[in-house]
């Protein structure tokens, strides 16, 4: 008798072996990917929260460490910081650059105070001043400065001194309130056509605007403070270095500076559309050696102005009082 023996197909063993040692099912891969992604997101959110808490606590500490050296004056519901020194007339009003504040003017203010009254101030959202409403363009900033000087009882006429981007605000104020202005000084001033005259200028504006968005986020998360991304100028005295370093890490100051720069199209148009300075004296101060295209802009920061005096200050340091004789142009 023949006996038939039936055995299980070997393929079953092969499938079982493959199940034990082969690649995991696709559903398993997706599960691990989701877990990994959630871990990364949770870690980033935790770090962001830690950074935001650190930024908030450090900002409060800085406020206590550096009280305002001047007075806080109410301007239509928010306070602006005003710091005056010296006696005499006309009063010199100093307008800082973008990301600048009253502390940057300390050496200049000390020198000018020996001969007349001089005031530095912080625009809304800068230094010790409260945040301001609306778009931070030349029109808003000039109106707030006018209210500040009136509320503080600082009589005109004023000599306005604007550094870099602050030069645009100075020109805007002088054109809006000509009866208050005795003269204007522009120190390496921005030009109302600086970012529109050439493709290179347009590219710089776009690049700086994008960079500002990144800096704003980094500041909110405490990174700007932690890595000292925006340091104080080494030529400042130690006390003012500490003040500038603290406020350059402040979320309010950095984001306000970004808002001011983003308003460049409005500010530039407002300055271009003004009737100019009429017969007001104008001095243009240029620090050190500069590129030719920048010098060309400095030749005409106030359109159609007939009398411009240019002085060159030696070196590449922060602005200081010049000693060279002015040459009319």
Image (cartoon, helix red, strand yellow):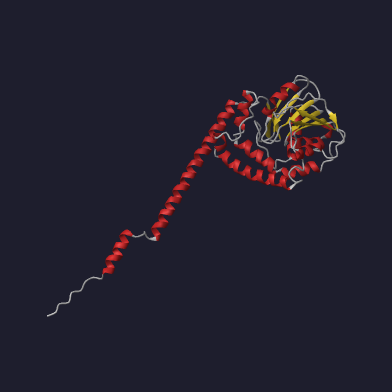
Q: How many marks?
A: 0
- Give the residue drawn at x 67%, y 31%: 101
From the viewer's perspective, tell me whether residue 215 is left or right of residue 158.
left
- Above or below, comparing residue 78 to residue 203 in the picture: above
Tell which of 197 and 90 is nearer to you. 197
Tell which of 3 and 29 is nearer to you. 3
Tell which of 271 and 198 is nearer to you. 198
Q: Position of residue 156 (x, y in %)?
A: 81, 28
Residue 72, visible in the rendered structure: no
From the viewer's perspective, tell me whether residue 77 is left or right of residue 51.
right
Looking at the rendering, in which quadrant would you find the N terminus? bottom left
Q: Position of residue 22 (x, y in %)?
A: 34, 60
From the viewer's perspective, tell me whether residue 306 is left or right of residue 148.
right
Looking at the rendering, in which quadrant would you find the C terminus? top right
Farthest left residue? 1
Q: Position of residue 8 (x, y in %)?
A: 23, 70
Farthest bottom residue? 1
Residue 296, visible in the rendered structure: yes
Q: Position of residue 266 (x, y in %)?
A: 74, 44
- Give the residue drawn at x 41%, y 54%: 32
- Give the residue drawn at x 83%, y 40%: 303
Residue 260 placement: quadrant:
top right
């Amino acid at each position: 008798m023949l006996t038939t023996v039936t055995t299980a197909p070997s393929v079953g063993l092969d499938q079982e072996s493959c199940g034990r040692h082969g690649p995991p099912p696709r559903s398993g891969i997706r599960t691990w990917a989701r877990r990994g992604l959630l871990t990364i997101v949770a870690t980033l959110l935790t770090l962001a929260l830690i950074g935001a808490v650190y930024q908030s606590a450090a900002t409060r500490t800085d406020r206590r460490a550096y009280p305002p050296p001047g007075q806080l004056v109410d301007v239509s519901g928010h306070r602006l910081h005003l710091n005056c020194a010296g006696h005499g007339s006309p009063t010199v009003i100093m307008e800082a650059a973008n990301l600048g504040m009253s502390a940057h003017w300390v050496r200049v203010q000390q020198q000018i105070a020996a001969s007349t009254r001089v005031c530095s101030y912080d625009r809304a959202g800068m230094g010790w001043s409260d945040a301001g409403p609306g778009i931070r363009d030349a029109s808003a900033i000039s109106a707030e400065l006018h209210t500040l000087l009136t509320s503080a009882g600082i009589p005109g006429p004023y000599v306005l001194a604007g550094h870099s981007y602050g030069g645009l605000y100075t020109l805007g104020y002088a054109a809006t309130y000509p009866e208050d202005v005795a003269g204007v000084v522009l120190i390496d001033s921005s030009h109302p056509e600086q970012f529109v005259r050439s493709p290179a200028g347009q590219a710089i504006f776009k690049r700086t605007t994008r960079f500002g968005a990144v800096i704003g986020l980094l500041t909110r998360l405490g990174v700007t403070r932690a890595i000292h991304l925006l340091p104080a100028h080494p030529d400042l005295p130690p006390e003012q270095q500490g003040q500038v370093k603290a406020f350059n890490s402040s979320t309010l100051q950095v984001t306000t500076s970004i808002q001011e720069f983003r308003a460049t199209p409005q500010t530039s148009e407002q300055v271009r559309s003004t009737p100019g300075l009429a017969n007001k004296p104008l001095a243009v101060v240029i620090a050190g050696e500069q590129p030719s295209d920048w010098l060309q802009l400095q030749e005409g920061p106030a359109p159609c102005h007939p009398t411009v005096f240019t002085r060159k200050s030696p070196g590449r340091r922060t602005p200081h009082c010049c000693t060279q004789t002015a040459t009319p142009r």
